[in-house]
Image: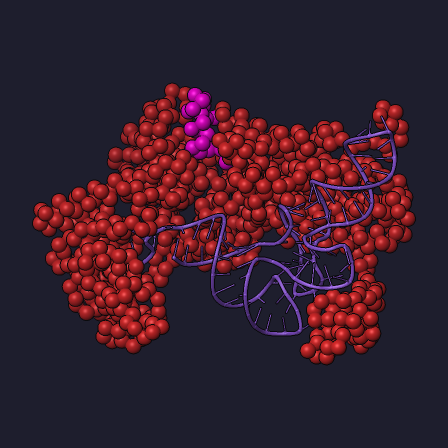
Amino acid sequence: MTEQNNSAAAEREYDIRAIQEKWLPVWDDLKPFDSGNPSDTRPKKYVLDMFPYPSGDLHMGHGEAYALGDVISRYWVQKGFNVMHPIGWDSFGLPAENAAIKRGLDPRGWTYDNIAQQRASMRRYACSFDWDRVLVTSDSMYYRWNQWLFLEFYNKGLAYRKNSNVNWCPSCQTVLANEQVVQGLCERCDSLVTKKALTQWYFKVTDYADRLLDDLDTLEGNWPHKVLTMQRNWIGRSYGADVDFEIEGRNEPVTVFTTRPDTLFGATFMVVAADSALAAELVEDSGSEIKAEFSAYLEMVKQSNDIERLATDRPKTGVFTGRFAINPINGERLAIWVSDYVLADYGHGAIMAVPAHDQRDFDFAKAMSLPIKQVVEVATEDGSSSDPAVTGVPTTGDGVMVNSGPLNGLRKAEAIDAAVELLAKSGKGKKTKNFRLRDWLISRQRYWGTPIPIIHCDDCGEVPVPANQLPVELPSAEGLDLKPKGTSPLGGAADWVNVTCPNCAKPAKRDTDTMDTFVDSSWYFLRYLSPNSTTEAFPKEAARDWAPVDQYVGGVTHAILHLLYARFFTKVLHDLGHIDFEEPFTRLLNQGMVLMDGSAMSKSRGNLVRLSEQLDEHGVDAIRLTMAFAGPPEDDIDWADVSPGGSAKFLARAWRAANDVSSATMVDFTSGNKELRKATHTFLRDFTAAIEGFKFNVGVAKLMELVNALRKGIDGSAGPADPAVREAAEVVAKALSLFAPYTAEDMWALLGHQPGVALAGLQEADTSLLVESSTVAIAQVDGKVRDKFDVPIDISEGELREMAMSSEAIKRAIGDKEIANVIVRAPKLVNIATK
RNA sequence: GCCGAAGUGGCGAAAUGGCAGACGCGGAGCACUCAAAAUGCUUUUCCGAAAGGAGUGCGGGUUCAAGUCCCGCCUUCGGCACCA
């Protein structure tokens, strides 16, 4: 063994640990991924990985995400682009705070320790980040621009405070955005979310609902279809009409939203959301019996949580208000009921009920024995009645209008138009639309976040902190009780809270809430343009040069929240004149998750695989390669199904091939072995297509094929000194650098080059080498392959047909059957169809 | 319930309507070795000794030709879920 090591270079062995140690410091000096040189003339590209939350060391999921992001980033560098590929930390937020409370530490120390650890792991993992572009959202240098943006929004009327029933997590003791309530549970801690009436800050996302929805069309083809669909559903635009109903004994009419104004003649009652102000007002003048019934019902509704509300088979409940509405289209008197199946914060919190043609109204009518009136007739198979009152099944689709006066005989679409026209004429209604999307609740009653830059003055009300007083720094956590108690811990920092009003100089108090951390991540991609600037959030000129992000990479978990908010911010910044584009992320790749034995890894499940241990065992390159080779990037990887050992084996094989190359650095490739040259250039063509199409697994497979061809070249007739062998080995090193940067760099050195394989440049395929002179034609009988021939590429249809017809195998397959048709697709195929 | 995606060897997976299973894992065999590891080579969809036949969730259809396109099912996964 020792003897071997001391002998020729050709007997060196692949040692990934030594290779890692050798190249890491070299790269630190070389900085191959610096994107900040103003004299750099390469075309620009912006590749962005979603930044991590510093909750500990990097895990397998990060390992996949950054391996894949690196493939893309490094690919464009090899293709000659000046790629900006920055990294940062989304370091504010509840988990840091909760962990800090649990351990009795300052969230600051805990957070920054984790960042240091993740940073070191990223360096070891050879992420191609530009380490001069780093941001940390909990740095005041970053969050002061959150505050600046908040005030920009505020001045435009896009940030406002209102009192309403908000989602409340009793465990986190803070409010949650609509988007953070998942199946009625807190996204963070899975506690049952309840409702609480509070005055909170909101961003007016609903002002942008139409644009957020319509502009999704411009992303079609560049974003995963799944994400576009989820965003569309989330925004949830529905077209319909607002219809005014007079209320007996009330001056103002009540407006309801309906998508089916055509069924107005079928309305038999009205329902008002139990927890709405309108409901309380309507029962105000009713008898004490009704009032008592209502109070009891409202109490019950408030007690119920979203889990109960969400049960679809839940029986309908409600109480009669004692009041009546007048149907504007036919003057009929409709009883007004109160129920929790109508939501206070959608539409107008009140509906017209058409039980014959709406499942929920039908269920309610059945439960309360209310009338059901058919106005849409649908065809039945046996010609029997389609009246829901008879069949017990409401019909919600298209049909022909009946019992509807002037609408009779019309179909749904025409009837909707006609009904809206009728209403418009009498001034009782108009065409409108509604959104599922609600305004974004951004205040949080927690410590570890961006302070809201507002001062509350008894005389002046809400007063924005003047721009020259930003940032409003988060006070030290020392002496503050961070434990959740329903109000912000910042309230306890007396020195910090008590200020003088910037307007009138009287004693005033700071707003003690902090911002949702999704504010931080809504614009961070712009901050990377000048992460250390103290004079501006981001430079306009650089935004023009670099932004929007050309390629965004991250998990599908952010398909709604983060992406929607970032899109909203981008549109607002556009309207404010800060940027000239309206969508932040041109292309989006969602990588899958890394599972173990079929399920998500977790400590409690006992199937946790540690990234650092995998790296120790197999080496960085093998793990990165395994992530890329496992399958399509958007699919989940079950770690139990993949083979990092196999990846390591392949890397050693590639490395040995480079080690065997014996030609000089400057040989002329054109004199090399033709067959191997063709394999190399076929690879160049196919590899480019695979990577640009995100088929990284296929790209790796092609690379393996080239290494196999290279091995054959070295061991076969070409030999290690053939120029084609060097050409192939160099292409392997350069392509391999996307997946296995250490091994590739070492191969590059073995091949006699200076460090920097990442920047070596992956050439275009020489298509002249790919021209075929002959090919294999297949001959089929009735679609089954019966014979194959080597044919010249320019063989005529007639010749190929002759060849097939005279083949013994073909004749045998045809037998005594009669030939019906012969299809010839020269030079590849003949198919003989028999009768 | 509504919307969407996907079903291919023992496994991860390939396949512009034109040779299904590239590439790899695992398995089997051979070479090297005293032996093992490592490495290299061969083989590996199923049935069949072979000739041959069958085969991409199931049932139909279009086509000279279907994993791929169309219709209807089944299953799995994901999203939404009283949104009027």
| Magenta stretch in the rendered image | A89-108
- The image shows a total of numbered marks equal to 0
Whether residue A678 is in magenta: the answer is no
**Which residue corresponds to the image point at 79% horizontal and 73% vertical from the top-left?**
A811
Quarter location, residue B38: top right
Q: Colour of chain B?
A: purple
Judge left or right: residue A129 versus residue A141.
Answer: right
| Residue A466, percent from left and from top | 39, 36
A812 on left or right of A547 = right
Residue A690 visible in the picture: yes
Quadrant of the image for the N terminus of chain A?
top right
Q: Colour of chain A?
A: red
| Residue situated in front as seen by the camera: A38 or A750 | A750
Give the percent coordinates (x, y) of residue A453.
Answer: 38, 36
Q: Is residue A746 above or below residue A726?
A: above
Q: Decide whether the magenta segment is chiefly helix, strand or loop.
A: helix
Magenta includes A99? yes
